[in-house]
Structures are given as C-alpha cells and as structure tokens.
Amino acid sequence: MKHLFVIATGSAGKIRDFAHILGTEHYEFKTLKDIGFDEDIVEDGKSFAENAIIKSSTTARWLKDRNIEATVLADDSGLEVFALNGEPGIYSARYSGIHGADESNNELLLKKMENIEDRKARYFCALSYQTITRDTDGNLSISEPKIFEGECRGQINRAPVGDMGFGYDPLFVPDGFDRTFAQMELEEKKAISHRGNAIRALKKALGK
C-alpha cells in the first residue's frame, strides 16, 4: 500500500512538482480538495517557515480528527530583494495590496528599485513536513514540524520579459542565465526552482 502524502494546497500544478521529484512508486499524493478540506487557513506568520507550519499543522489536525494516517507537506514561498531588506518577502503575492495581482506587484517592485543598482534577489521556499501516525494502542499523534528550505538566487531585471510563469517570473533572472524565469520552459525552471530545491532536500532526508 502506498503512503499518503497530503499537500496543503489546492493547486494541481504544485502537486505535480512533488510527485515528479519524490516519485509515485511508494507515495500517493492528494490536495486539500481531494481530501474534502475546504476550510480557510489564515496565514498570519511572520516568516515563510511560520506560514508553512500553520498550513501543515492545520491540515494535520483535520486529518487526525478524521482518524486518517498520512504525511502532510505545506510550503510557503516568495521573492526577497536584498537591497529592499527582503521585500516583498511573505507579502509577495499581495505586495501591491491585492492578492495575486502579478502585474501591479511587478510594477511596484520596479518602482521601488528605480534608483537601486544592487539587483540581487532570491526566490525562497520553506517546506513543512509533519506525519500523523498510529501507535500500538491505535491512537493517532502528530509529529513536530520539520522544515526543509530551498532557494534560487538571481537578479531583478530592469523590465519584465517573457510571458510564461507567474508572479515575479518576468523580472527574475536566475544566476548563470541570461533569461528570466518567464522565458524558460517549465521543466528548465523546475530544475533550478526554489520549491524544487526544497523538495529535493526533503527527498534526500527521506533517503529516497
């Protein structure tokens, strides 16, 4: 029987990243939607790791209440510009005030960097891992969260280029490349992405 991994997301695209790297021989992957979880999770942490733990812990408690053994994975990620003291950071998705407004988020970032020569930045991901396991008496318990991190360093371009990807991808040029994330094919981006690197760190810890 395959071990159940619940990814604390509603994104089918994100779950494919986990399945591709961790493999499906031993693991079955499900999203929150797949398990019937429809509650709102308030991500009010002060760091990527805190927000990831909030998501994994909330999901793990939900599964435990329903007597389900599983492993929960939750990630939180965003862009950090070093010259802006880490902005937009945990507010990456709502930097301009509207969640998911990629164009206005990019415009605001470029405006703040108009007179800044140091363009160094990184995409960062914190991945929280928790298990719900059953003891010999049949009681379920939730493990303490373990955090796995991944990053991709690069530079912020002077203007958006490319029409693939999302978020700040049209502005982010990874180190060693002369193209933005938004100019890269998906598989090429996945090979160096912050989330991919965090998942690969988890895979190494699992010994798979």
Image (tube, rainbow, N blue to C red):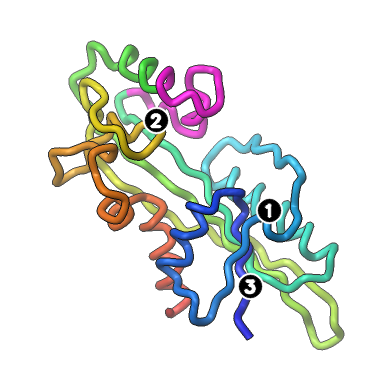
For this view, does 13 lie left or right of residue 62?
left
Magenta stretch encompasses residue 87? yes
Magenta stretch encompasses residue 150? no
| Real-space CA distance between mark 3 and mark 1, rounded to the nearest whole angstrom | 14 Å
Instruction: Specify start and end residues of the magenta stretch as a single range.
Output: 84-105
Residue position for label 1: 33
| Real-space CA distance between mark 2 and mark 3, rounded to the nearest whole angstrom | 35 Å
Looking at the rendered image, the disc whose residue lies closer to the viewer, 3 or 1, is 1
Of the numbered discs 2 and 3, the one sitting upstream in the chain is 3
Residue position for label 3: 4
For this view, does 10 lie left or right of residue 205?
right
Q: Name the spot of residue 89 as percent of width and height, x first.
A: 45, 32
Disc 3 residue type (three-letter): Leu
In this view, the residue in front, 178 or 131, is 178
Q: Please report the residue visible at 48 percent of the width from the left and 18 percent of the height from the top.
A: 96
**157 relative to 15, above or below:** above
**123 relative to 112, above or below:** below
